[in-house]
Image (cartoon, grey):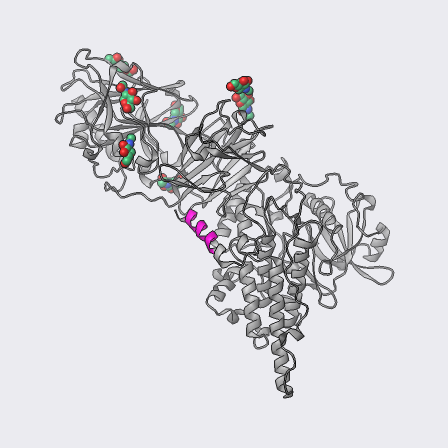
Amino acid sequence: MAFLLVLFCVFLSTTSTRNLASSKEVPFSPHDNYLVNCGSPTMTTLSDERTFRSDRQAASFLSSKDDILVAISSTKDVPNPLYLTARIFVQQATYNFKMTRPGWVWIRLHFYPINNDQFDLRNSVFSVSTEEVVLLHNFSVNNETKVVVKEYLLNVTTPLLYLKFTPMKHSAAFINAIEVVSAPDGLISDVGSTLFPVGDFSGLSNRAYQTLYRINVGGPIITPQNDTIGRTWESDDMYLQSRALAKNVSVSPSIINYPAGLSPLIAPNWVYASAVEMADAIEKPNFNITWKFDTDPAFDYLIRMHFCDIVSKSLNDLYFNVYINGKMAISGLDLSTITSNLAVPYYKDFVVNASLISDQLIVQIGPMNQNPGAVNAILNGLEVLKMSSSVGSLDGEFGVEGTDMGASKSNKGAVAAVGFAMMFGAFVGLGAMVIKWYKRPKDWEKKNSFSSWLLPLHAGHSTLMTSKNSMGSHRSNFYSSTLGLGRYFSFSELQEATGNFDQNAVIGVGGFGNVYLGHLDDGTKVAVKRGNPQSEQGITEFQTEIQMLSKLRHRHLVSLIGYCDENSEMILVYEYMSNGPLRDHLYGKNLPPLSWKQRLEICIGAARGLHYLHTGAAQGIIHRDVKTTNILLDENFIAKMADFGLSKNAPTMEQTHVSTAVKGSFGYLDPEYFRRQQLTDKSDVYSFGVVLLEALCARPAINPALPREQVNLAEWAMQWKKKGLLDKIIDPHLVGAINPESMKKFAEAAEKCLAEHGVDRPTMGDVLWNLEYALQLQEASSQGKLEEENKAEAATTTTSSSAGVVVAPTAIAPVNSSTPDNPQVVEANSAPAQVHAIDEHSGTTMFSQFAEINGR
Ligand SMILES: *[C@@H]1O[C@H](CO)[C@@H](O)[C@H](O)[C@H]1NC(C)=O
Ligand SMILES: *[C@@H]1O[C@H](CO)[C@@H](O)[C@H](O)[C@H]1NC(C)=O
Ligand SMILES: *[C@@H]1O[C@H](CO)[C@@H](O)[C@H](O)[C@H]1NC(C)=O
Ligand SMILES: *[C@@H]1O[C@H](CO)[C@@H](O)[C@H](O)[C@H]1NC(C)=O
Ligand SMILES: *[C@@H]1O[C@H](CO)[C@@H](O)[C@H](O)[C@H]1NC(C)=O
Ligand SMILES: *[C@@H]1O[C@H](CO)[C@@H](O)[C@H](O)[C@H]1NC(C)=O
Ligand SMILES: *[C@@H]1O[C@H](CO)[C@@H](O)[C@H](O)[C@H]1NC(C)=O
């Protein structure tokens, strides 16, 4: 009677453990499948036919401040080409993967300590975490030269999956290859059986797992090629105790007959087609077969056992016991009753509480006492998964929050919000944003409330967080040593000029401080920018601005007249731009509308300024905050670029990009820069594309008040452009006054600027050329009209006579210094950064590669 009850219980729990939808061998195709060979110059196809992309290609999802690529050339010592290259991080670095839908995801991390002359990777210590779970803490390969692969299974519920690599102090992190691959939904059900006390444990779908052991008992290793979902199953050789007691048995995999609700996704037929059974059971009828595994007693484990009766000659002949750590797990397992047939797979999940585990996990099978049938016991497969602890860790006692492994909670929320915003294109947001991936100062949260992330739309200067790292940290004398700052002003002189910094004289506001209109003694009007010494980011921006301006002189850049550093003031004095920001003349201020020609000339001026920044200055400079409020107009409506507070030196020829925290303004932000945090001058080109659309359509880059599809100007206008109907949404003031050819050229330039990938965007020089051309077309047509009106005879000139000087795009001058942030970069992305890329063909190739990695 008791026996029957046990059977009944087993049967009940069986039904709950099998819930894969189909028994058909439909090949599983993962929604997300990222295979990345880190640091590899090319893609790599393994012998199991899986192709790993390089993280140096366009589809890279890496963001790091410092990374070093190392490689070995010999394939002799490594099992496959994934281990020929590695990426080394000396600061926290993040890979991010876009997930198409929530669910189970495998993460596999491949480590092989490549011998190199920079770091002894065999002894480097680091941590790896996602936003929610610590995967590895204080990890090293323990001074051994061997391949280590770690596999995790996570229920990912956010649209971006982050993998953060954090080196321990005085060490470096490294990675050779990463797999992020969707797993079938039914792979792990929510409920497993507990042993002590016997019962059910629910909540498995909220845990994260690390695969510690996955074993094809009694059979050979199964490689990813032979597993429907790319798993590796090892042989049980290493874990089997008293080998003489065990005997291998195997059958042809083709006879394995999956029942309804169980498919090869749970385990391939190769697993069920081999088993270990009792050797010499007739002579010595009573013993157990034992396997032992090293485990960490601080964690709970999910243990999945696979059974399939491939040894019996007939049904109802095999009954045996299964033990875990000396406790009865299944008493009198009767596969015949459960599966109703031979060679039918069955599996059962056990949740083993840490309290049951010493530092070893012991699995045993043995015959049942008073066995009615044959004396035997079998096991076909075994999986041991470590379960994440209550604080969200799979290694060590701390969760993501409890360590210095990165984002604080508020940061996490913000990043997620921004992630969604970028992905779904409709952030109902305010002025400026920043995402900071790197370690914050400890008191960050105290000092910066969430509100400081969001600025008034019309701020003259964006307030943005800046890390404490950068240039010259001593406020007192940081620019007295800098040359080229122009005239020195005394504080009293500026007090007088601004009416003692009168609120009514304020013409701009930012996190940096206020900008005042000043009247000098000689009647000259100046703009006086007074830094707020309380503002940390203000100081950094102030310093950056000074460093930049001290080496820049150009007709289309706002020029510095002088400065004042008396009484630890931080004041810069600029030429006054009496017509203010371009934006005010486009919308919102009821100023007289600019003509199309004026808009073209202003855009051309701004483009010249940017072109100079990118190519002409002593070093290439990336503005990083190109927008219509940073294009100022003087009394003659000559456009000048302003606000260099966020600017950065462009990457060197070898570098191709600067890795940096993302900064900029909503609506103008280069999506590629956002994704990869790798800054190039093409990020400015993207933002400039938005400026062009603003000039054409006379509306803000982001207008949260509009219907969702219209909120983001760049997206909305490009939709209309694709339909060939862009003229339907232009500024009504331009309708009829704009030459269609000129507008077409202009819109094409904007579209190219907004290309998804930086390499597909033109240089500022190319943009300039196109704008000049658009101006020529406009002037030719208005001249034509004039001539018609005057009934003049023959036009003596063609378009060229009426146009301004056409500046041919100049080649970008090589820049040779490494940026202060990146002294460590030995080698980086080898793709050419400065492709004059309007080559449609190369663009397509790039895009298809990208589509491929995403779509697989
Ligand atoms: C990392 O591990 C080493 C020994 O393996 C230990 O001495 C050290 O305290 C650990 N550090 C942390 C932060 O856990
Ligand atoms: C690493 O192993 C080598 C020998 O393989 C040994 O000479 C060296 O001392 C070890 N280093 C550490 C830090 O244990
Ligand atoms: C993942 O977790 C969420 C909530 O934690 C749950 O609703 C969902 O069913 C889980 N997904 C799977 C595949 O178990
Ligand atoms: C069972 O087969 C595997 C793989 O073929 C082998 O490694 C192992 O030694 C065998 N075990 C026994 C007990 O013979
Ligand atoms: C793996 O598959 C190949 C080809 O399908 C087959 O020859 C090989 O025996 C299989 N090995 C295992 C362990 O399943
Ligand atoms: C098999 O192992 C279980 C649990 O460790 C133990 O209780 C039982 O006595 C063992 N059976 C034999 C025959 O050794
Ligand atoms: C393990 O046991 C402890 C206390 O006995 C309990 O709080 C915890 O929930 C158990 N964990 C699992 C996975 O059953």
Q: For residue 180, what is the image quadrant? A: top left
* Camera-side residue of 567 and 42: 42
* Camera-side residue of 402 and 228: 228
Q: Is residue 820 above or below residue 432?
A: above
Q: For residue 305, what is the image quadrant? A: top left
757 part of magenta stretch: no
Answer with left or right where residue 202 lies relative to residue 795: left
849 part of magenta stretch: yes
* Residue 728 seen in the figure: yes
Q: Which residue sits at x=66%, y=56%?
A: 459
Q: Is residue 271 above or below residue 589?
A: above
Residue at the top extreme of this rendering: 283
x and y, in percent, of residue 48 in the image: 35, 37
* Camera-side residue of 397 and 674: 674
Answer with left or right where residue 97 lies relative to residue 342: right
Answer with left or right where residue 690 lies relative to residue 336: right
Residue at the right extreme of this rendering: 521
For the record, the magenta segment spans 844-854
* Camera-side residue of 237 and 315: 237
The quarter of the image that holds ligand 3 is top left
Q: Main structural element of the magenta stretch: helix, strand or loop? A: helix
Q: Which residue sits at x=70%, y=56%?
A: 642
Q: In this view, does 743 lie above or below 711?
A: below
* Residue 593 seen in the figure: no
x and y, in percent, of residue 142 in the image: 50, 22
Tell me the quarter of the image containing the N terminus: top left
x and y, in percent, of residue 154 in the image: 41, 37
Q: How many labels does the image show?
A: 0
x and y, in percent, of residue 39 in the image: 51, 38
Residue at the left extreme of this rendering: 314
